[in-house]
């Protein structure tokens, strides 16, 4: 033992009270540090689980994808889970009171879709086949049309189009510039009423009705939800794997994982340029179209000149088709 160790040991022995107090202080500091770290991790996990329970446990949503795309992503080594619902089509909501939301949108859920997209039943039950439907309470609260369990709906269903382009739920209602071409008549029985699905944007032109996907005649268009193994890589994944796709991130979940650069008050374009009461569209921020590996953010367009952005038909011009 060298001289320094001997002097230190003698000091500890002679000042036993100070030694004991020092040991207790170190132990308390270590316990406090551990407790704070455990609290932070637990709080983050609580926030993530809460957000997933409200908005869904997905990280990327891809609009208007085909069946082959969904199957391809399910086999991607970077994807933990890929689920989808069929975009069956739109039908006119007879008697609707919201001029900006004149349609019913039919979504055909697969069995595994319910595990990723939360559906909050108010009463009734979930649909068990392609002839049953779950109606959002938003239809009555916002659209002024009431449906009850047991009602039978006969709906001429088709696609929204403008200038030969098929529109989806992320394209707001464009008035006389769009048409609805009904291709078939479908009959459904209402089996339940649910809260407005979180994946339905406030700006969506159709109230979501959920039914079971018909496995015998699958729809050509699908909305695909991807849960990644590494959520922090969602942007790089989208840049490399979603070229040419219209997609959005689940920032409500990614925010608590530290994997989103979105803020709680993002810049947003306005709906209703030329109308008396334009209003902010919170759902437009963060929807992208990936072209040749480059992502364009609608917020950039809005931050430059919101009036010019609104002046473009359908909130999208030649350079920014499908971007929000």
Image: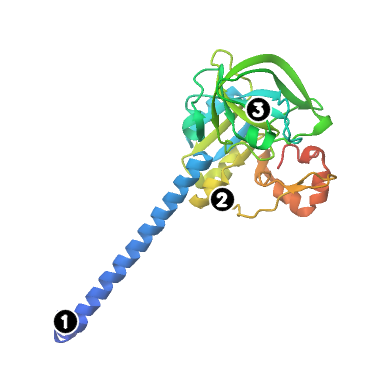
Near-viewer residue (305 or 197): 197
How far is the residue under mark 1 from the one under mark 2?
53 Å
Near-viewer residue (195 or 151): 151
Task: Give the residue displayed 82% in from the left and 41% down from the top.
Answer: 312
Q: Does residue 255 appear in the picture of this structure?
A: yes
Left or right side of 307 for 168: left
* Residue at which label 3 appears: 105
Residue 208 coordinates in the image, percent (x, y): 62, 30
Task: Give the residue displayed 47% in from the left and 27% down from the top.
Answer: 112
Residue 260, numbered circle? 2
* Residue at which label 1 appears: 9
Residue 16 coordinates in the image, percent (x, y): 16, 83
**Residue lying farthest to the right in this orientation:** 274
Q: Nearer the viewer, mark 3 or mark 1?
A: 3
Is label 2 in a helix, a strand or a loop? Answer: loop
Is label 1 in a helix, a strand or a loop? Answer: helix
Left or right side of 51 for 145: right
The reply to whether callout 1 and callout 2 are in contact (CB within 8 Å) is no
How far is the residue under mark 3 from the one under mark 2?
29 Å
Near-viewer residue (87 or 157): 157
């Amino acid at each position: 033992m060298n001289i320094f160790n001997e002097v230190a040991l003698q000091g500890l022995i002679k000042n036993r009270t100070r030694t004991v107090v020092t040991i207790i202080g170190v132990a308390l500091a270590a316990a406090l540090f551990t407790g704070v770290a455990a609290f932070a991790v637990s709080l983050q996990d609580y926030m993530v689980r809460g957000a997933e329970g409200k908005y869904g446990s997905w990280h990327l949503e891809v609009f208007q994808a085909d069946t082959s795309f969904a199957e391809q992503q399910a086999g991607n080594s970077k994807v933990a889970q890929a689920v989808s619902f069929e975009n069956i089509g739109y039908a006119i909501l007879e008697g609707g009171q919201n001029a900006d939301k004149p349609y019913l949108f039919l979504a055909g859920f697969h069995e595994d879709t319910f595990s990723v997209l939360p559906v909050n039943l108010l009463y009734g039950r979930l649909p068990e086949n392609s002839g049953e439907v779950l109606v959002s309470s938003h239809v009555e609260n916002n659209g002024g049309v009431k449906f009850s369990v047991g009602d039978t709906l006969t709906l001429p269903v088709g696609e929204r189009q403008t200038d030969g382009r098929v529109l989806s739920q992320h394209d707001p209602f464009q008035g006389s510039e769009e048409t609805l071409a009904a291709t078939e008549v479908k009959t459904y029985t209402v089996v339940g009423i649910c809260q407005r699905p979180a994946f339905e944007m406030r700006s969506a032109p159709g109230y979501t009705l959920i039914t079971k996907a018909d496995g015998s005649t699958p729809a050509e268009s699908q909305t695909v939800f991807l849960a990644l193994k590494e959520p922090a890589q969602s942007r790089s994944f989208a840049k490399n794997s979603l070229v040419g796709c219209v997609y959005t991130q689940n920032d409500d979940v990614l925010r608590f994982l530290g994997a989103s650069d979105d803020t709680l008050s993002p810049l947003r374009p306005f709906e209703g340029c030329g109308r008396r009461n334009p209003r902010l569209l919170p759902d437009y921020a963060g929807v992208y179209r990936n072209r040749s590996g480059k992502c364009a953010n609608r917020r950039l367009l809005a931050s430059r000149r919101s009036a010019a952005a609104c002046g473009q038909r359908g909130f999208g011009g030649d350079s920014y088709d499908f971007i929000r």
